[in-house]
Amino acid sequence: MARTDKTFKLSYNESLKLCREGKLPSTIQGLALTLGVSRTTARKVLAHLEKNKIIERSDDGVHFLQPVKGSDFFHPF
C-alpha cells in the first residue's frame, strides 16, 4: 500500500472519531492541524466524508448528516 493511501485511511478513520464526538473542524486548515497531515490530505478526507453523506459543509460550518457506523471506517490494513 502506498504511504499516501495509508495516511489518508488513518486520517479518515480519525476524522470519523472526531465526527462521533462532534469535534470535526470545519476548515481544511483546521482539520490538517488537528490530524497532523497536509492540507491536501485534509481536503481529500473532507471530500470523502461529504461523498459518503456523513457531513455537509457550508458557510455556517459542518453539519452532521448521519451517525458514524462501524462500517464507515477503513478496516485494519
Image (spheres, rainbow, N blue to C red):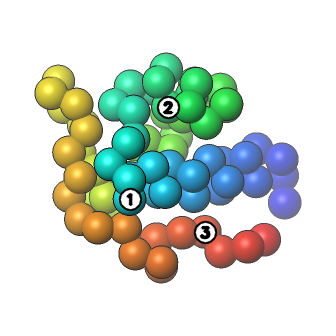
- Residue 55: give x, y in percent of width and height: 28, 50
Q: In this view, does 12 lie above or below 67?
A: above
Nearest the viewer among 2 and 26 is 26
Which residue is the site of mark 1? Answer: 20
Which is nearer the N-term, disc 2 or disc 3?
2
Q: Give the spatial CA distance, label 1 vs label 2.
A: 15 Å
Q: What residue type is labelled 3?
A: Phe
Q: Which residue is drawn at 73% across and 46% down?
A: 7
Q: Is residue 27 above or below residue 35?
A: above
Q: In which quarter of the image is the N terminus?
A: bottom right
Residue at the extreme front of the image, as rendered: 21
Residue in the picture at 65% in, 56% down? 9
Residue at x-position 32% and y-position 48%: 22
Disc tally is: 3
Give the image quarter of residue 51: bottom left
- Residue 43 appearing in the image: yes
Question: Pointers 1 and 2 in contact (CB under 8 A)?
Answer: no
Answer with left or right where residue 4 lies relative to residue 64.
Answer: right
Q: Residues within 10 Å of mark 2 (few under 14, many from 20)?
A: many
Number of residues whose C-alpha sits closer than 10 Å to that of mark 1, classed few (under 14), some (14–19) or many (20 or more)? some
Q: What residue is pinned by disc 3? A: 74
Q: Residue 54 carries which label?
A: none
Quadrant (top left, top right, bottom left, bottom right) of the C terminus: bottom right
Q: Mark 2 points at which residue?
A: 31
Front tag of 2 and 3: 2
The residue lying at 57 percent from left, 52 percent from top is: 14
Name which residue type carries label 2: Leu
Kind of element beneath mark 2: helix
Residue placed most toward the observer, 2 or 38: 38
The kind of residue tagged 1 is Arg
